[in-house]
Image (cartoon, rainbow, N blue to C red):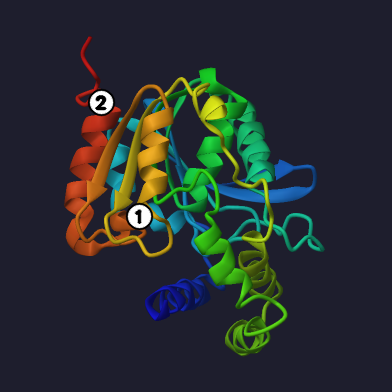
């Protein structure tokens, strides 16, 4: 329990480094109904969409973009309200992955990208679940890291007990002192409120069965944020899926410096079809 709480605070602390994230030379902005969404467009070839986890930015993929861009056109996005992207629905404390999915689809439409590969971590992976059930034909190969098909009772109980009516008051005081910024405060509130939002995510076996992309489920065997059962169920119900349980990988194994070379190797193998199941 304590380790999980520490992990959350580490995510929040990491976000402070993104307070004034610079716009990179390959950075662009997409206007979605008056909301500016930042993305970076690098390389050529088949499109590869990169979606970061909550409290992060497109910079999360810096260790990989150079290698990916040698054969893919990488599109790395700042999630709404994160980094260089505008806040979406400022008065709504419930972060909805389905809303973000609609923004991503609009961006892909504007870029005229009809068939894409994708990698998403945690919230990014959950957004990919929405995307792949909304437009199954649009995705070719997908890698989901530390994603959830539903928030388990364990997660909901753990977070809501520390929610806005109890320990979250002290947490918000701490966040205010650390950030002093509208974005940081909103994201902190959204994070704590999100596990009370039933239905996002909520993917039943029949819905997962509609996914057509080749799918790689990646999860650390010691992920304290997401029960391992989630990865097993995702693999069980997504038709063309493979499963990679990472020893001592934690919640976000791709962010472990010691593990990055392995993740790059395996992710490229999967995206290039070397993991395809044989009839």
Name the quarter where the C terminus is drawn: top left
Q: Is residue 4 left or right of residue 91?
A: left
State which mark lies toward you, 1 or 2: 2
In which image quadrant can residue 143 be found?
top left
| Rendered-image quadrant of the N terminus | bottom left
| Label ID, residue 272 | 2
User: Is residue 188 shown above or below 144?
Assistant: below
Which residue has dot 1 on it? 62
Please tell me which residue is depicted at 43% across the width and 29% down the height of the picture.
Answer: 237
Looking at the picture, does residue 203 appear above or below residue 133? below
Q: Is residue 48 left or right of residue 150?
A: left
Q: Position of residue 38 (x, y in %)?
A: 59, 50
Q: Residue at x 30, y 54 (%)?
A: 254
Residue displayed at 51% across by 72% down: 15
**Which of the two residues, 57 or 169, is positioned nearer the viewer here?**
169
Query: Which label sits on residue 20?
Result: none
């Amino acid at each position: 329990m304590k380790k999980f709480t520490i992990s959350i605070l580490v995510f929040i602390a990491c976000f402070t480094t993104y307070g004034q994230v610079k716009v990179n030379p390959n950075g662009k902005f997409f206007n979605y109904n008056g909301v500016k969404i930042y993305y970076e467009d690098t390389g050529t070839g088949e499109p590869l969409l990169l979606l970061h986890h909550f409290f992060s930015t497109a910079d999360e993929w810096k260790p990989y973009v150079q290698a990916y861009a040698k054969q893919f056109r990488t599109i790395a996005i700042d999630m709404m309200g994160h980094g260089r992207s505008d806040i979406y629905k400022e008065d709504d404390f419930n972060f909805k992955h389905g809303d973000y999915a609609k923004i991503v689809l609009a961006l892909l439409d504007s870029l005229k990208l009809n068939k894409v590969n994708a990698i998403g971590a945690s919230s990014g992976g959950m957004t990919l679940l929405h995307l792949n059930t909304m437009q199954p034909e649009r995705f070719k190969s997908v890698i989901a890291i530390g994603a959830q098909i539903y928030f388990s009772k364990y997660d909901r109980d753990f977070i809501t007990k520390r929610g806005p009516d109890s320990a979250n008051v002290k947490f918000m005081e701490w966040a205010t002192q650390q950030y002093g910024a509208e974005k940081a405060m909103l994201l902190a509130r959204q994070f704590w409120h999100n596990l009370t939002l039933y239905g996002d995510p909520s993917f039943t076996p029949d819905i997962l069965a509609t996914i057509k992309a080749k799918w790689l489920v990646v999860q650390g065997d010691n992920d304290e944020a997401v029960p391992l059962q989630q990865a097993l169920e995702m693999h069980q119900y997504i038709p063309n899926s493979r499963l990679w349980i990472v020893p001592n990988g934690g919640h976000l194994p791709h962010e472990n410096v010691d593990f990055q070379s392995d993740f790059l190797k395996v992710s490229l193998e999967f995206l290039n079809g070397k993991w395809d199941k044989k009839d």
